[in-house]
Amino acid sequence: MSLNTKRIIIAVIGLFFLSALLIVGGIESNKRILGKKAVIKVSATSESCVDCHTVTSPSLVEQWRDSKHAIRGVGCMDCHQAEKTDVDAWEHEGKTIAVIVSPKDCSKCHARENEEFQASHHADAGKIIGSLDNVLAEVVEGNTGRLGLDGSSPAAISGCWQCHGSVVKIGKDGRPTPATWPNTGIGRINPDGSKGSCTACHSRHTFSPVVARQPDSCGKCHMGPDHPQKEIYEESKHGIAFKAFKEYMKLDAQPWRVGIEYTAAPTCATCHMSATEEQMVTHDVGRRISWNLRPPISEKIDAKAIKAGKKVESWEQRRKNMKNVCGKCHSEKYVDGFYIQFDSAINLYNEKYGIPSTKIIKMMKAGEILTAIAFDEALEWTYFYLWHHEGRRARHGASMMAPDYTQWHGFFEVAERFYIHFVPEVREACEKAIQKGGKSATAAKEVLKELDIILNKEEHKWFLGKMSDDEKASRKAAADEFKKRYAQH
């Protein structure tokens, strides 16, 4: 090949790449132009907002320009406009606006989604004032007096409320107070009386479903020592598959149905909220949950409502809803087998640890063996760890197929807490009460009797050295076989 021929070939290739760059640049330029044209579609009142905030907070505006809201002509004032009579209304650049866009505001366009959400457990997440968790944050960890902010504990403001939601209060200037805002807690109680925060999952101002469908989005709140759902998910085969095949998940697809638009893996949204061929998307996250794994003793999800005389969707129907999702990847026998294992784990926790420990604590409180003050005695902390931390981890681990959380972070720690801490501390507290005499002494004797009845049940007899001869022989044979097997390596 001659030198001139080589030069011609190189020149042609160069022109080809230059043309390609110009085409791509043109496409990108068109994208930017289209993005700017999206602003023109909104009302004149919103245009002035965009012009100003493009300078003061450009990222916010760009996020909005990338959203479906912008494409469909939904502008700033469509969401932020307020009536002069609204408690959080204030005048800004000649307009009456509100900082907070509540689910009530969103319901103007998303009525069904709001109705479902308001009926969900998420919507009530802000009602934590009387909970033990809140006592810890407001009193034990925090301070509502000298070290507080507007009478509230900083530990609660920056901790609990950021997931559960604050009760938003409005200052004299019409703006939310610093103690209660910023806040995107899922159960936030808004100035207009509505509950919740859509931006807890649909981060503003793109409001993209891609964010809401990410396990990380749920992990903002569902993680940590007492409810480690995100860590549990990541340990499970479901989470492993998501990390491996995330690029095939089509997270921006509409609709987004497992088994149709995507098959690579499930996310939190897949199982708890998203559509299947037979079910619509739901914003009531409890519609596919059959057990309540939160309290000291687990109960079916509809149990409290039934006791209160309310008519709600039954736990059986909710399980059927979830099985419908499971069935998109697993056989009926596989799913049924999982639920048998899951129910068995919950029953084990309840019968061996949850019910007995809760009964003992209630007897000790009623008999004034323990004070009325929360968390002022070691036994109260021990009991709290047992059900609130270890007990939840065991139950959640079993619910999401994460064996390490079920065992070592779960039942192992529950058992250690029960036998090595709870039982001795109950005995010690009762012995002190008996020595003291009076009403608490009588109650203490009853508690010790109940504890003796509990420990003499079949599942606890090993602790008293009362394991049957057959069981001892069986355990010894298994241990010998194990040693023999590993001695060969």
Image: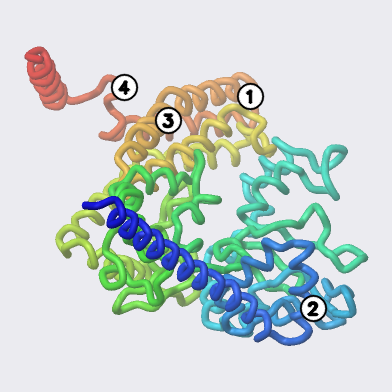
Which residue lies under the disc numbered 1?
437
What crowding class fits label 1: few (fewer than 14 Cα within 10 Å), some (14-19), or many (20 or more)? few
Which residue lies under the disc numbered 4?
464
Residue 385 picture location, percent across and down: 51, 35
Give the Cα separation between the discs numbered 1 and 2: 77 Å
Q: Hey, what amino acid is under mark 1?
A: Gly
Mark 1 and 3 residues: CB-CB less than 8 Å, in contact? no
Which residue lies under the disc numbered 3?
418
Is residue 178 placed above or below 327 in the rendered structure? above
Mark 2 and mark 4 lie on one chain; the one further toward the N terminus is 2
Mark 3 and 4 residues: CB-CB less than 8 Å, in contact? no
Give the Cα separation between the discs numbered 1 and 3: 27 Å
What crowding class fits label 2: few (fewer than 14 Cα within 10 Å), some (14-19), or many (20 or more)? few
Residue at the spot x=35%, y=49% of the render?
243
**Which labelled disc corresponds to residue 48?**
2
79 relative to 454 in the view: left or right: right
Q: Hey, what amino acid is under mark 2?
A: Ser
Corner quadrant of residue 64: bottom right
Q: Hey, what amino acid is under mark 3?
A: Phe
Mark 1 and mark 2 lie on one chain; the one further toward the N terminus is 2
Give the Cα separation between the discs numbered 2 and 4: 77 Å
Corner quadrant of residue 202: bottom right
Q: Hey, what amino acid is under mark 4?
A: Leu
What crowding class fits label 4: few (fewer than 14 Cα within 10 Å), some (14-19), or many (20 or more)? few
